[in-house]
């Protein structure tokens, strides 16, 4: 199967993996916030389209072996970077959005510790501007990136990291890996832990509850084997058709199903990733 998927790229991890005596396990980084966002910034997070993203990172545990098994099956077409932002005045951008400038700005990136120390949680006496700046700093801590784009940054950054992780010399992966893991668990019932808890929205929060991993594979080789041996009928491509799941999805996400499979570029400054939904149409009922 690996040869069919990656016939245009002999530097893909799947080729190297066949020759490795020890499996490569990526170091997976996830930024679980210390607590839910302050109610004082909820309106600003909603306005930025980031409220539900802010709710997904509470106590999620990653399975690095599942992540690498998914990465190994990822076909890559090549570079997705266009343009350059090296000439940007990041100090000016930082001051405009946050009202202060970090002493240590590397390109478009700033230290997460500086954000936490500089922007304490607002209280009832905080001004509207202080709340807005705290909301921006909170978003930056969630995505762990220095770029200032709220809309497509989560998917663009995740896709970018996934493509980079197909290279054999890559040891770490970041981005919203809990989203990738949740996508797999909803669609691969044979790799899904048992959770005895009602569905909640965002759906990714399902994996924040206690779960049973009995009879699930624990080593990478067994996960690969399960993915290889399962027939198409054993994958659950349209899990959200389950009425129990659909009942908790907000109406605003169900009003125009055509937007689910639109093919568009996700732009995050230098990172441009095409959202190629036309490659995964089974999950939209096609």
Image (spheres, rainbow, N blue to C red):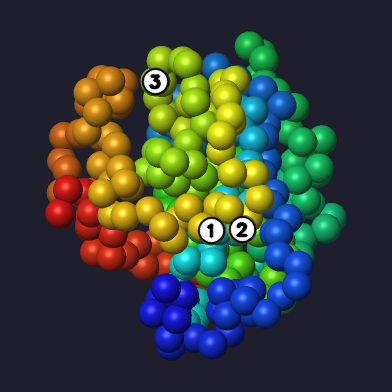
Query: Which residue matches tag 1?
Result: 224
The residue lying furthest to the top in this view is 124
The percent position of residue 240, horizontal first and vertical second, equals: 27, 34
- Tell me the mark number nearer the camera, choosing from 3 and 1: 1
Of the pair 66 and 79, the residue shown nearer to us = 66
Gap in angstroms between the C-alphas marked 3 and 1: 28 Å
Q: Which mark is residue 221?
A: 2
Residue 104 in the image: above or below residue 85: above
| Disc 2 residue crowd, few under 14, some 14–19, many 20+, Cα 10 Å | few
What residue do we see at 42% from left, 67% from top? 273
Give the quarter of the figure containing the N terminus.
bottom left
Q: In the image, is 258 to the left or to the right of 26? A: left
Tell me which numbered mark, 3 or 1, is placed earlier along the sequence: 3
Residue at 42% across / 29% down in the picture?
202
Residue mark closest to the camera, 2 vs 3: 2
Depicted 99 relative to depicted 251: above or below = below
Residue 225 showing in the rendered view: yes
Tell me the residue that label 3 is attached to.
Answer: 199
Give SS at disc 1. Answer: helix
Q: Secondary structure at mark 2?
A: helix
Q: Residue at x 75, y 72 (%)?
A: 21
What kind of element bears circle 3?
loop
């Amino acid at each position: 199967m690996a040869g069919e998927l990656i016939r245009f790229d002999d530097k893909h991890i799947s080729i190297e993996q066949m020759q490795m005596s020890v499996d490569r396990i990526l170091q997976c980084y996830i930024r679980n916030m210390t607590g839910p966002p302050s109610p004082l910034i909820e309106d600003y997070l909603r306005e930025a389209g980031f409220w539900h993203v802010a709710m997904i990172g509470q106590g999620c545990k990653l399975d690095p072996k599942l992540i690498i098994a998914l990465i190994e099956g990822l076909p890559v077409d090549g570079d997705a970077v266009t343009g350059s932002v090296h000439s940007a005045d990041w100090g000016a951008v930082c001051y405009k959005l946050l009202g202060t400038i970090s002493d240590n700005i590397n390109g478009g990136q700033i230290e997460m510790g500086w954000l936490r120390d500089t922007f304490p949680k607002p209280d009832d006496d905080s001004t509207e501007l202080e709340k807005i700046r705290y909301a921006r700093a909170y978003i930056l801590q969630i995505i762990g990136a220095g770029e200032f784009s709220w809309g497509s940054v989560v998917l663009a950054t995740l896709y970018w990291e996934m493509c980079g992780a197909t290279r054999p010399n890559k040891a770490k992966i970041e981005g919203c890996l809990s989203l990738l893991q949740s996508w797999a668990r909803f669609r691969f019932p044979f790799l899904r832990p048992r959770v005895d808890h009602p569905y909640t929205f965002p759906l990714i929060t399902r994996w924040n509850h206690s779960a049973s991993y009995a009879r699930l594979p624990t080593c990478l080789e067994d996960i690969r084997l399960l993915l290889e041996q399962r027939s198409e009928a054993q994958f659950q491509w349209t899990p959200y058709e389950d009425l129990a799941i659909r009942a908790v999805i907000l109406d605003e996400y169900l009003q125009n199903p055509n937007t689910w499979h639109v093919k568009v570029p996700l732009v995050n400054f230098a990172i441009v990733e095409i959202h190629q939904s036309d490659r995964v149409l089974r999950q939209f009922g096609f």
